[in-house]
Amino acid sequence: MTAEIDCRFLAWDSEFFGCRIARVEAAGLDAKGMAAVQEHARSERLDCLYLLLEASDVDSARAAEAGGFRCVDVRLTLERNLDGIGTRMPELDETCLLYTSD
């Protein structure tokens, strides 16, 4: 299996948390790909890696766990087709005003 790996340094996260952080997006990750990710992390002196995988990519998840990663969060992206959705804004009398007593 040939892995497609994209590793990006996250400047904002690194500054905020005070350590060098990068995000890895991978597809088809195997033991060889995991070794490449780890070598890149060492060469860039990274302290933390976020690994993003497709939920259906079970083999990559297993390779990542074998390489020391652990699942700590699940990122969910929702999408909806907007065809046929009206673009009319509600009239003022159709809206509810917010009061400090609410």
Image: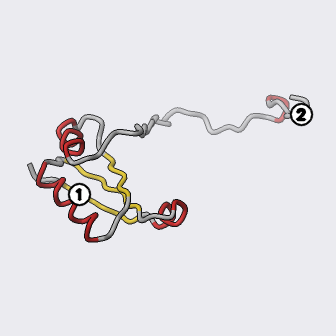
Note whether 34 is above or below 97 in the view shown: below
Circle 2 is placed at which residue position?
99
Residue toward you, 99 or 25: 25
Is 96 situated left or right of 43 in this image? right
Residue toward you, 102 or 94: 102
Where is residue 73, by image quadrant? top left
Picture coordinates of residue 54, whole percent (x, y): 29, 41
Is 77 situated left or right of 35 in this image? right
Residue type at tag 2: Tyr
Q: Which quarter shows the C terminus?
A: top right
Q: Earlier in the sequence, mark 1 or mark 2?
A: 1
At 85% from the left and 33% from the top, the residue drawn is: 97
Picture coordinates of residue 36, whole percent (x, y): 17, 60
Where is residue 62, by image quadrant? top left
Is 84 situated left or right of 59 in this image? right
At 21% from the left and 48% from the top, the residue drawn is: 67
Picture coordinates of residue 75, whole percent (x, y): 42, 40
Picture coordinates of residue 57, whole percent (x, y): 22, 38
Circle 1 is placed at which residue position?
5
| Pointer 1 with pointer 2, Cβ within 8 A | no
Note whether 96 is above or below 53 in the view shown: above
Residue type at tag 1: Ile
Q: Residues within 10 Å of mark 2 (few under 14, many from 20)?
A: few
Q: Residues within 10 Å of mark 1 (few under 14, many from 20)?
A: some
Note whether 49 is above or below 56 in the view shown: below
